[in-house]
């Protein structure tokens, strides 16, 4: 059976953020497989896992009981499949870990369940199956070495210390390997409430509104880079104008690059993803795969012709970590009919003239 990719619910598995909610908020760590009665909407990609030959048989009772713990659903369920992966990769690169990562499939079996007012009602999810990949799953006995948390911590270390979200998995049945397909969403330890802008669940959960990075002062300007062959002195008014327009210009520039990415890079790239559109605190804007290798684009844009751009400390840290697969695209005259585009790698950027931005003052 050839290797295959399977998507999981967006934001169902993220790691490296600081949970600042009073009630707490964690990833749901599961993806429904057959939530709808319409079979065309079922997760056929996950269903491929069932026939991969990777299912573990004759699990110890202790491990089965860990998998059958009830969570938000109060329904009883049965364990259908259990998969343990010892050969683990991170975006195509071998992960440095001795632990294995496990996931499993459960099916709800109760015809009746208790609702919120403790009354027995029909279980509309009878027969529903979910793929579970809990962060806390730990079992290091009975010849198992499962430690999902340790695997995720190893990903955090190997990716340079950036909080990440798992968008899906790539499974290779022949090599019995699991490849984590991730996007980096913020610096490690960033507040959970500052990262997500899409509401999730009920009550005081993830934020709905756009994030005001300037107001929260969580994305410092860092340095201004000016190309050596077109240096123009920056006045206080220049900085003020740049600050007021950079958000709008940045969005226009990102969209222009995203819409024209194959023309700007090449026609043979795939898995193109506009990361910063979903995760505005990501240290890059766009990611894609080229010849099996993950590449990253940072987009900077200005309405003028001066080749100047800001980079935060997090963006610089990311650029230096991923310099071999990193390109910064500067879009000038971004609001014109024919914007101008220039590309820079890490070495060219660090060789540019650097200007510290003005200090901001906040009245009491």
Image (spheres, rainbow, N blue to C red):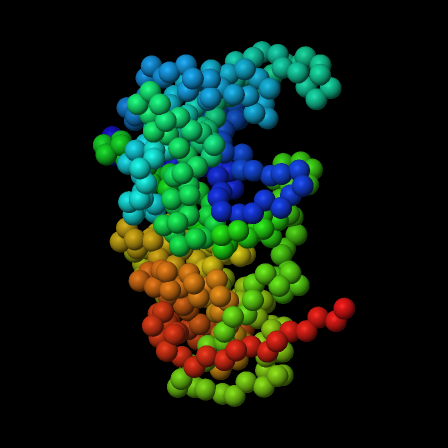
Of residues 143 and 333, the one drawn nearer to the viewer in this rendering: 143
Of residues 340 and 94, the one drawn nearer to the viewer in this rendering: 94
The residue shown at (36%, 69%) is 346
Tell me residue 121's x, y (percent). Answer: 67, 14
Tell me residue 302's x, y (percent). Answer: 52, 74
Residue situated furthest front in the rendering: 141
Question: Is residue 294 among what the camera can see?
Answer: yes
The residue shown at (71%, 70%) is 362
Tell me residue 327's x, y (percent). Answer: 37, 66
The residue shown at (40%, 68%) is 328
The residue shown at (52%, 88%) is 233
Q: Quadrant of residue 215?
A: bottom right
Tell me residue 225's x, y (percent). Answer: 46, 77
Numbered disc total = 0
Q: Quadrant of residue 216?
A: bottom right
Q: In the rendered image of this protein, does residue 161 appear above or below residue 61?
A: below
Residue situated furthest right in the rendering: 364
Q: Give left or right: position of 37 versus 207.
A: left
Q: In the rendered image of this protein, does residue 357 appear above or below residue 325?
A: below
Q: In the rendered image of this protein, does residue 38 appear above or below residue 160?
A: above
Q: Give left or right: position of 245 versus 47.
A: right
Q: In the rendered image of this protein, does residue 104 appear above or below residue 288?
A: above
The N terminus: image quadrant: top left
Of residues 9 and 253, the one drawn nearer to the viewer in this rendering: 9
Question: Is residue 260 among what the camera can see?
Answer: no
Of residues 87 and 48, the one drawn nearer to the viewer in this rendering: 87
The C terminus: image quadrant: bottom right
């Amino acid at each position: 059976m050839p290797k295959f990719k399977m998507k999981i619910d967006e934001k169902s598995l993220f790691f490296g953020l600081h949970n600042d909610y009073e009630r707490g908020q964690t990833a749901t760590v599961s993806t429904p497989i057959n939530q709808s009665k319409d079979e065309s909407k079922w997760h056929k990609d996950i269903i491929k896992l069932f026939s991969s030959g990777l299912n573990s048989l004759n699990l110890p009772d202790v491990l089965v009981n860990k998998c059958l713990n009830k969570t938000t659903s109060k329904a009883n369920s049965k364990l259908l499949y259990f998969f343990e992966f010892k050969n683990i990769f991170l975006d195509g690169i071998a992960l440095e870990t001795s632990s294995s990562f496990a996931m499993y499939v459960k099916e709800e079996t109760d015809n009746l369940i208790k609702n919120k007012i403790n009354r027995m009602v029909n279980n509309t999810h009878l027969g529903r199956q979910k793929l579970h990949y809990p962060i806390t799953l730990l079992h290091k006995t009975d010849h198992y070495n499962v430690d999902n948390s340790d695997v995720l911590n190893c990903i955090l270390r190997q990716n340079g210390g950036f909080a990440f979200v798992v968008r899906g998995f790539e499974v290779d049945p022949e090599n019995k390997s699991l490849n984590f397909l991730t996007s980096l969403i913020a610096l490690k330890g960033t507040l959970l409430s500052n990262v997500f802008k899409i509401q999730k669940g009920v009550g005081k959960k993830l934020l709905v509104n756009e994030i005001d990075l300037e107001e929260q002062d969580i994305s410092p300007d860092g340095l201004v880079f000016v190309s050596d062959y077109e240096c123009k002195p920056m006045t206080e008014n220049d900085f003020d104008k740049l600050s007021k327009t950079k958000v709008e210009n940045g969005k226009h520039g990102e969209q222009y690059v995203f819409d024209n990415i194959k023309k700007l890079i090449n026609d043979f790239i795939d898995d193109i993803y506009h990361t910063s559109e979903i995760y505005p605190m990501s240290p890059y804007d766009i990611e894609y795969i080229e010849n099996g290798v993950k590449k990253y684009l940072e987009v900077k844009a200005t309405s003028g012709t001066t080749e100047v751009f800001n980079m935060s400390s997090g963006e610089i840290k990311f650029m230096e970590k991923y310099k071999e697969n990193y390109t910064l695209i500067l879009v000038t005259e971004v609001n014109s009919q024919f914007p101008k585009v220039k590309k820079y790698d890490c070495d060219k950027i660090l060789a540019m003239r650097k200007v510290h931005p003005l200090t901001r003052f906040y009245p009491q």
